[in-house]
Image (tube, rainbow, N blue to C red):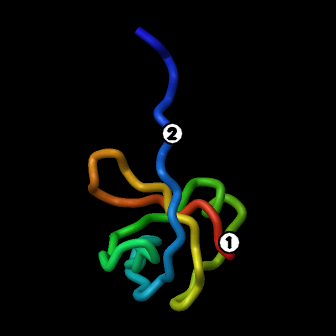
Amino acid sequence: MDNQQKKAAAVLGVVTEALPDTLFRVKLENAEAELLCYLAGRMRLHRIRVLVGDKVFVELDPYGGKGRITKRM
């Protein structure tokens, strides 16, 4: 078995709603879908704030559940 990690697809989106526990609703630019996203660990560690209207990079879960916000533009 290979120990290679699968590369997650990163897409650009806009935060539409801020929810409790660092969860956000993000509208993806390449699709008309809204996705429930959480902050990546490094963003929590460095206390990077994400507000409604911010453009963010989202790594999509390969199983289609949630996305992870990895970078704020």
Q: Which residue was labeled with disc 2? A: 7
Looking at the picture, tell me which residue is in the foreground, 7 or 24.
7
Q: Quadrant of residue 49?
A: bottom right
Q: Which kind of residue does numbered mark 1 sit on?
A: Ile
Q: Residues within 10 Å of mark 2 (few under 14, many from 20)?
A: few
x and y percent of residue 15 in the render?
A: 48, 83
So how many labels did they put on this image? 2
Furthest-top residue in this view: 1
Label 1's element? loop
Q: Residues within 10 Å of mark 1 (few under 14, many from 20)?
A: few
Residue placed at 59% from the left, 80% from the top? Answer: 55
On the rendered structure, is 40 left or right of 6? right
Quick check: 64 above or below 54? above
Quick check: 8 above or below 6? below
Label 2's element? loop
x and y percent of residue 25 in the render?
A: 38, 78
x and y percent of residue 20 in the render?
A: 39, 78
Looking at the picture, tell me which residue is in the foreground, 8 or 40.
8
Q: Quadrant of the N terminus?
A: top left
| Closer to the eye: label 2 or 1 | 2
**Distance of label 2 from label 1 (alpha carbons):** 24 Å
Q: Which kind of residue does numbered mark 2 sit on?
A: Lys
On the rendered structure, is 64 left or right of 21? left
Residue placed at 65% from the left, 55% from the top? Answer: 42
Q: Which residue was labeled with disc 1? A: 48
Looking at the picture, tell me which residue is in the foreground, 18 or 21.
18
**First of labels 2, 1 by sequence position:** 2
